[in-house]
Image: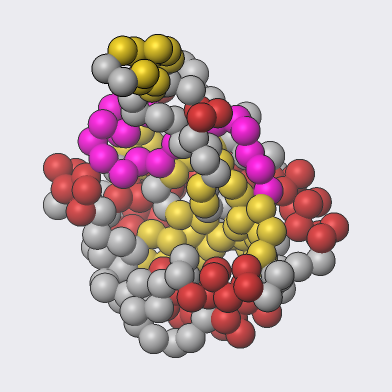
Amino acid sequence: MQAVILAGGRGTRISEESLVRPKPLIEIGGKPIIWHIMKNYSYYGINDFIICCGYKAELVKEYFANFGLYSSDISVDIKTRKITFHKKKLENWKITLIDTGIDTQTGGRIKRVKKYLENTFCLTYGDGVSNVNLKKLLSFHNKHKKIATLTAVRPLPRFGNIKLDKNKVSNFSEKDRLQEGWINGGFFVLNKEVFDYIDSRENCIFERSPLQNLSRDGQLMAFKHESFWHPMDTLRDKNYLNKICRNRKFIWKK
């Protein structure tokens, strides 16, 4: 099975980092966030990736083209230009990197990689980590026989809640994920019929008409994930994820 990763956005809400590198290459725990996402897929045996590049696509291509150099101890013979890799164990990944345009929206990016896809495929965003059980997700998708499955998650609230009786605080509660509604957390499973719902326009946003029409036709299902999920939209998110890494609690890793 293949996994498509959307990695082309400008990341304007984390411009402190994205001015010099695309968001998927921003590091948490010493590795780009896209590496963490791919490691989770790889744990479940999904090692064939299609990456939808856009903003600073050349840096994403350079990172994976030189992945062996970054991941291994090497010896370099300057005269012969021979490079010897001492650490032989590398990721068993096949990676196809497609430049889908700098300003192309999510639907347009997905449409542009259609010809590289075989059958049912996974899709997620290149800026969010989760410990979603992909085996259970795929089983859920295969059982309901619909075109599309998204992973529904509850975001971690940023603030506590208070209840007011006029001006009197009648109840105060700390942050509670269960008080939040369900949102789209990515980690889709899609049949190729999904392309019937996605047009070729550059500004086609997958989360609007395509998903709305799939829902209207009864072809969109939600896999509820109650455990860890967190996006990296802002510098605050990055710092939070790095704090987890510093405490050696890679919640999203197996």
- The quarter of the rendered structure image containing the C terminus is top right
Residue shown at the point (49%, 35%) measured from the top left: 180
Name the residue furthest right. Answer: 143
Q: Left of 107 or right of it: where is 11?
A: left
Disc tally is 0
Asked whether the viewer can see residue 161, the reply is yes
Residue shown at the point (25%, 53%) measured from the top left: 11
In-front residue for pair 211/196: 211
Where does the image place residue 39, in percent across and percent down from the top left?
A: 55, 41
Q: Is residue 233 magenta?
A: yes
In-front residue for pair 232/149: 149
Name the residue furthest front. Answer: 166
In-front residue for pair 72/237: 237
Q: Is residue 201 magenta?
A: no
Residue shown at the point (32%, 33%) measured from the top left: 237
Residue 10 higher or lower than 103, as above or below: above
Where does the image place residue 247, in percent across and percent down from the top left?
A: 42, 13
In-front residue for pair 7/107: 107
Image quadrant where residue 47 sits: bottom right
Image quadrant where residue 99 sits: bottom left
Q: Left of 253 or right of it: where is 102?
A: left
Where does the image place residue 219, in percent across and percent down from the top left?
A: 70, 70
Residue shown at the point (76%, 44%) measured from the top left: 136
User: Magenta stretch?
Assistant: 223-244
Q: Left of 32 or right of it: where is 50?
A: right
Where does the image place residue 193, in percent across and percent down from the top left?
A: 68, 79
Image quadrant where residue 146 sits: bottom right
Residue 113 higher or lower than 199, as above or below: above
Asked whether the viewer can see residue 89, the reply is no
